[in-house]
Amino acid sequence: MGASEILDELAALADPKIRAVNQRHGDDHDVNLTKLRAVAKKAGHDPEVARELWATGDTAARLVAILITRPRDYSATELDVMLREARRPKVHDWLVNYLAKKSKHAEELRVLWFADEDPVVASAGWALTSERVAKNPAGLDQDALLKQIQAEMRDAPERLQWAMNQCLATIGIESESRRERAIAIGERLEVLKDYPTPPGCTSPFAPIWINEIVSRREHA
């Protein structure tokens, strides 16, 4: 499938009701994600078409672009440029989770993004830091991370705050020696303490999140 054919299919699937729901969360795509994934599956792996779709700036097209490529298709510079262009939350999240986290450039990007002055870009650095805490913590100064979270998370912009909170919870879950401190920081800051959590889901409030996951692992 060419880029124009994919764009035509996405246009045919557009639903104003879906757009209205997504706009409440800062997104603007109007295609059901299950149907969007089906379009991507039909298109198959195609980095060239993906770059054409990305260049349109359309959110649905960019989501398909992410799905029809692999982390190995992009250099660190390309992923950095794409992240800075990915202002919509869903595009940002998919880019980080599907491409950046699995890229051979993940550590380079983590360091680059972590210290960025743009809080949205910095949130991607924190997301990659959480991934490293969980999978490859050797050499990572987790005590310094906890100190920074304690100092900055409460007043951080929303998306950065969520990413820092995830890192706090990940440290508390994965590092037994730091668990008590991580829980204490969460209790002191009270970030997301009152966040509405549907039945059967885990609260994003770090102390509850940490204790819930640790308990599940102990009883697995």
Image: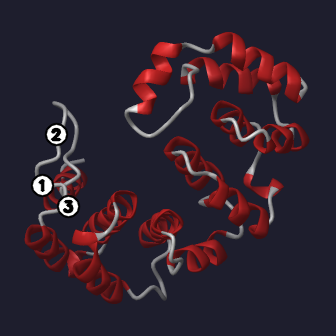
Q: Quadrant of the N terminus?
A: top right
- Dot 3 amino acid type: Ala
Q: Position of residue 108 (x, y in %)?
A: 66, 77
Element type where label 1 sits in the image: loop
Question: Mark 3 and mark 2: span between their CA atoms?
Answer: 14 Å
Q: What label sits on residue 196 in the rendered view?
A: 2
Specify which label sits upstream in the sequence, 1 or 3. Answer: 1
* Left or right side of 28 for 200: left
Q: What label sits on residue 206 in the rendered view?
A: 3
Q: Answer yes or no: do the residues labelled 1 and 3 have beta carbons within 8 Å?
A: no
Q: Answer yes or no: do the residues labelled 3 and 2 have beta carbons within 8 Å?
A: no
Sort mark 1 into few (<14), some (14-19) or many (20+) by Cα contacts within 10 Å: some
Question: Mark 1 and mark 3: span between their CA atoms?
Answer: 8 Å
**Total of numbered circles in the picture?**
3
| Residue with the mark numbered 1 | 193
- Dot 1 amino acid type: Lys
Asked which quadrant contains residue 15, the reply is top right
Asked which quadrant contains residue 55, the reply is top right
